[in-house]
Amino acid sequence: MAYSEKVIDHYENPRNVGSFDKNDPTIATGMVGAPACGDVMKLQLKINESGIIEDAKFKTYGCGSAIASSSLVTEWVKGKSIEEAQKLSNTLIAEELALPPVKIHCSILAEDAIKAAIEDYKSKK
Amino acid sequence: MKLPIYLDYAATTPVDPRVAEEMMKCLTMDGTFGNPASRSHRYGWQAEELIDIARNNIAELVNADPREIVFTSGATESNNLAIKGAANFYSKKGKHIITAQTEHKAVLDTCRELERQGFEVTYLNVLPNGLVDLNVLEAAMRDDTVLVSIMHVNNEIGVIQDIAKIGELCRARKIVFHVDAAQSAGKTPIDLRELKVDLMSFSAHKIYGPKGIGALYVSRKPRIRLEAQMHGGGHERGFRSGTLPVHQIVGMGEAFRIAKEDMAKDTKHIEALRARLWEGVKHIEETYINGDMEHRVPGIFNVSFNFVEGESLIMALKDMAVSSGSACTSASLEPSYVLRALGLTDELAHSSIRFSIGRFTTEEEIDHVIGQVNNSIDKLREMSPLWEMFKDGVDLSTIEWEAH
Ligand SMILES: Cc1ncc(COP(=O)(O)O)c(C=O)c1O
């Protein structure tokens, strides 16, 4: 299958790969997906007192499109408020990366990862 | 070195130049283009002679009588003809068929079709090494079992089934035994005078012949009957009608002739390259070979690099053409059913790569592959949350994943 240039770029030069300490109270962690489906995403957000996402990191087990979707999301959420981040939809991600229909689930997973991280942030407060 | 390096010989092989040369002699006005069924002139007689030679070469590789070889369009058609043809012909005796879960789709889907027609099919579990447990097979045999279909060499993991013993079990009960030998002809010796096999499927394009041509061996002693699936001019003794494609058959014949001549040499060459590849990657932590270590052909080498997803690995291995057991592109997101049948965990099944090595693979290519595999695994594990959890001592099987 041919990948779009943007997917290849994110795959070859993934932004913000890594982990924060998940026990740090300023860190929100979202982990979504399942090994059975062939993709698992972990997204971590560092959120300051005014609810702004200062930093983001990810680790993804999955195909190139899954890796690219999560890498893109870490770029997009930085500097955004939680409310703004919550609005990032899978369609925006899929459009930006020109994902083919069989890879739409990768962008859905990335959206779910943001939501799961924000959920974690709220539950930690 | 030509990039990407071709390591997908189990999917198909390039045509050997010696084969291509023979084929080209059967196409144009200057060549042997005639219809072998034309009895009234030399064009037909010459074509028929080439068909006879090809049929002999094919029969010789597997020690059969040339009259037992029926040409088809490939192993898919051979499997269809063998399974549907035998099941339908012998259906008065019974309507039960036995096969294995790890068979090629050309066998499994044919069996599914027969189920729709009222047959009952048992899909045997295999052992974790990919081999059929003969006791389990024997226990599945019933009075109304008319057909057993078990492949010789598995296309994903390369294991060799014990078709000699399975043949004995079938013959003792007068059950027709079909073997899909698409991946084994020319790779491992086959002696149909010794083996108690009634039907065997072959394909040309897995052994350096052209695509679109294959054959079915139909035993004469004992005489096996089939219901034809393709009706027409009564070619191939009524088993399969249709004008014989001379260039294709000549190509298949030459490929089989060369396979017989070169099998020992090819095997030694491929065996050495496989060993070299394994030497270069076996130190990578959490790396597993899929399928039995002893009963296998050297050319198909299926390895799981745990906690790295196969499709992303294929993307990283951009200098090589390989295939993966992960099928993230399909709607189901299911990993390979063959690897699942071995009982692999989801992670391991999704983490597999099939390297298939062939006649034209070189040491230089394998060395390049080793380098890229090592670099890619490091990079992808650095990115893998599963690897991180594994390194933190988390047992992944205890986690409740929310499947999507
Ligand atoms: C084991 C097995 N059986 C059948 C086939 C189908 O062969 P063909 O492409 O000649 O129809 C293949 C190849 O894809 C195979 O590996």
Image (spheres, coloured by chain):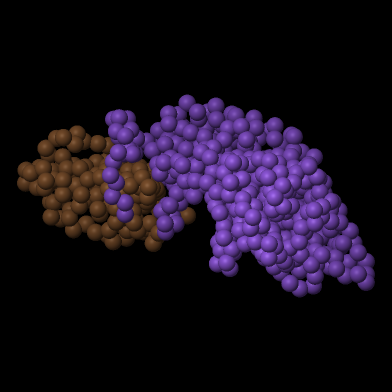
Chain colours: A brown, B purple
Tell me which corner region of the image, top left, top right, bottom left or bottom right, holds residue B329.
Answer: bottom left
Q: Would residue B353 appear left or right of A115 to someone viewing this image?
A: right
- Relative depth, front residue between B375 and B48: B48
Residue B168: image quadrant is top right
Is there any visible trace of residue B263 in the rendered image? yes
> Residue at the location (62% across, 62% down)?
B95
| Residue B202 appearing in the image | no
Residue A26: percent from the left, percent from the top?
12, 39
* Residue B179 spot, x, y in % from top left: 68, 50
Q: Residue furthest bottom?
A: B232
State the image coordinates of residue B194 (x, y, percent, origin top left): 78, 42
- In the displayed structure, B88 sits above or below B306; it is below
Q: Is residue B227 left or right of residue B112?
A: right
Residue at x 54% of width, y 37% of height: B129
Residue A18 vs B54, above or below: the answer is above
Residue name at image x 24 percent, y 41 percent: A57
Residue at x 65% of width, y 61% of height: B94
Numbered circles on residues, count: 0
Q: Position of residue B17 (x, y in %)?
A: 74, 48
| Quarter occupied by the N terminus of chain B | top right
* Residue B355 lies in quadrant: top right
Q: Does residue B167 appear left or right of residue B372 in this picture? A: right
Quadrant where the C terminus of chain B is found in the figure: bottom left
Single out the residue that lies furthest toward the right.
B41
